[in-house]
Image (cartoon, rainbow, N blue to C red):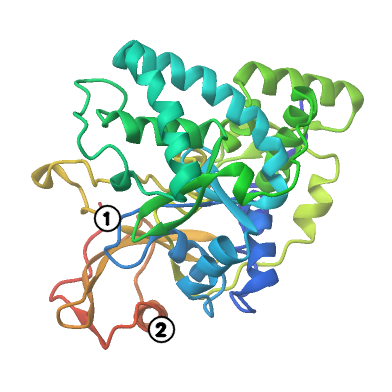
Amino acid sequence: MSAPTLGNRAARRLFLDRHALAEQPVGPARGRDLYELIHRLGFVQLDSINTLARAHDMILFARRPTYRPGNLKRLYERDRMLFEHWTHDAAVIPMAFYPHWQLRFRRDAVRLKRQWRSGRGEGFERQFRSVLQHIRDHGPVCSSDVGQDEKKGSGGWWDWHPSKTALEYLWRSGALTVIGRDGFRKRYDLTERVLDIAIESPEPGDTIDWLCHAALDRLGFATSGEIARFWDTVTAQEARDWCARALERGSLMEVDIEGHDGRSRRCLARPEVFDMSDNVPMPPGRMRILSPFDPALRDRSRTERLFGFHYRIEVFVPADSRKYGYYVFPLLEGDRLIGRIDVKAQRECQSLCVTALWPEHGVRWSDARTRRLMAELDRVRRFAELGDIRMTDGWLREPR
């Protein structure tokens, strides 16, 4: 059966708008304004790699250049407007969503305990009670504060010592809450002490409905699999069932989304998707350096279908086998991903160093593009609190 088609350019614009990349990157970036941005995105992924700045800071800076890392720290650790848990990876999430994480806590408790038991043996479960009692008696802890004399496992759950395993399990299952980080080490406290109010626990069906609606709102259009993967809590079958019911009710419609190569993929969207796409602004022409963990890029297959941009992080690829580099940043210009850049902060000389830039095939690198790049590099330099920009000889490479 045929379905209406949303053209590729309209689809790209709508997708970027859902991820707060279609408007001018201006505006306040602290307190309630920063919270509203994170609420709009759904979550901001955390990552420890810091070749230039932390991933979460780069994500927020790309949308609000007035953002500084302390703004997120205050919102998370002081104001308690965010909590840390998992979507597809560790992330900070609006506290308003916390009731719907009760389902995630229960599912993680079952899944992780099954993994833990298979690799750890029965004695480790006693560690849960011991760690909880330690926190009750002594207050918040990092993993280094417990289990100093314990031996690590051998091939078990992440090969951690028993108390670290207990901390992670108790956090993932909801008994503990991460209240902040020292450097990048998590600090844990009792959830009942951090959240001194009763937290409602919606019925599983209500949470599944909320998660699917919220995912589609942030994607604009999606397959059932993309809806399931967005929060990574709903199962593939639950997402398919939800989509089937929504189609039957008429609250969703089928639409063919044109890819960058002209081929279409059948997706689901709200009936007003074409009105929404007509009202989305044209993304600004300024160049932006995006984090590899930017929410607009997290589904690599979707990025490739819509933008023709094949991207993989090569952190774990041996150096002599890397195609580009250890940690290379995508470049967004308007509604196109036009290249990738190997740039890092050299703190010892207070410089922002550009090793290489590879334009995408079909992108002509003009003098005007170089000026836009230098303007963005200067913004990033100031954000990273560096003194100057250094361009390696031969930095502009041929497309690969």
Q: Quadrant of the N terminus?
A: top right
Find numbered disc 1 in the image and state the secondary structure of the residue it sits on: loop
Please, what secondary structure does the residue beneath circle 2 have? helix
Depth check: give the residue in front, 258 or 372: 372
| In the image: residue 134, left or right of residue 200 | left
Indicate whether 149 appears above or below 332: above
Q: Quadrant of residue 310?
A: top left
Image coordinates of residue 12 in percent, x first then y, are 61, 52
Q: Which residue is mark 1?
A: 327
Residue located 68% across and 53% down the image = 14
Q: Percent x, y for residue 6? A: 71, 43
Q: Circle 2 sits on which residue?
A: 375
Give, as a three-letter code, the residue at label 2. Answer: Ala
- Counting from the top left corner in percent of width and height, residue 221 is at 69, 40
Hey, which quadrant is residue 215 in on the image?
top right
Task: Name the quadrant containing residue 23.
Answer: bottom right
What residue do we see at 45% from left, 18% from top?
113
Who is closer to the viewer here, 240 or 285?
A: 240
Does 38 appear above or below 212?
A: below
| 194 lies left or right of 383 | right
